[in-house]
């Protein structure tokens, strides 16, 4: 028998057994991703490294934030159309470009020549 064949037989399996995603684990990833949990922490919860998280759960990570935003946006929209004034204002400011502006009027504005005149001839 050649040395390389002997070495192959002596080698022990390396690392852990391959990760197997389950429906329950996918749901865990979805829920954590929806609320903004850092990927490193999600991986830790599952007992895997971040690379493995990306390998098996890329779809859940990518879509969960969009799904959460759609859910919250839908709830906000429903509140706004049902008459919640705060929700209406928030929606209009963030989605429709409405802005509140303060106009400050000063009727006591002096011209530069008036200011110069006051400086040259101060009242006694």
Image (cartoon, grey):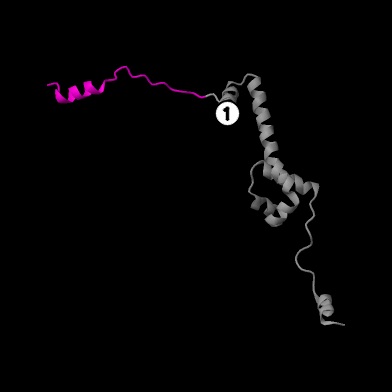
Give the position of the N terminus as an image quadrant: bottom right
Picture layout, residue 93 above or below residue 35: above
**Quadrant in the picture for residue 14:** bottom right
Q: Residue at x 38, y 21 (%)?
A: 104
Magenta residues span 99-124
Q: Is residue 47 visible?
A: no
- Tell which of 9 and 17 is nearer to you: 9
Q: Which percent across, then down, holds residue 99? A: 51, 24
Residue, far right? 1
Q: Which percent across, then down, holds residue 49? A: 69, 57
Residue, far front? 113
Give the position of the C terminus as an image quadrant: top left
Q: Residue at x 79, y 69 (%)?
A: 13
Q: Residue at x 58, y 20 (%)?
A: 85
Q: Which percent across, then down, holds residue 59? A: 74, 45
Picture layout, residue 72 above or below residue 8: above
Q: Is residue 70 left or right of residue 12?
A: left
Residue, far left? 124
Q: Is residue 47 left or right of residue 118?
A: right
Q: How many marks?
A: 1
Q: Which percent across, then down, holds residue 28? A: 73, 46
């Amino acid at each position: 028998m050649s040395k390389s064949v002997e070495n192959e037989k002596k080698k022990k399996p390396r690392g852990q057994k391959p990760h197997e995603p389950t429906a329950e684990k996918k749901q865990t990833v979805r829920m954590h991703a929806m609320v903004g949990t850092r990927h490193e922490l999600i991986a830790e919860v599952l007992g895997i490294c971040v690379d493995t998280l990306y390998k098996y759960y890329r779809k859940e990570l990518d879509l969960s934030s969009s799904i959460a935003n759609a859910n919250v946006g839908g709830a906000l929209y429903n509140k706004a159309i049902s008459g919640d004034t705060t929700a209406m204002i928030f929606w209009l400011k963030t989605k429709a470009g409405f802005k509140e502006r303060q106009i400050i009027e000063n009727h006591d504005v002096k011209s530069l020549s008036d200011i110069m005149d006051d400086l040259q001839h101060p009242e006694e």
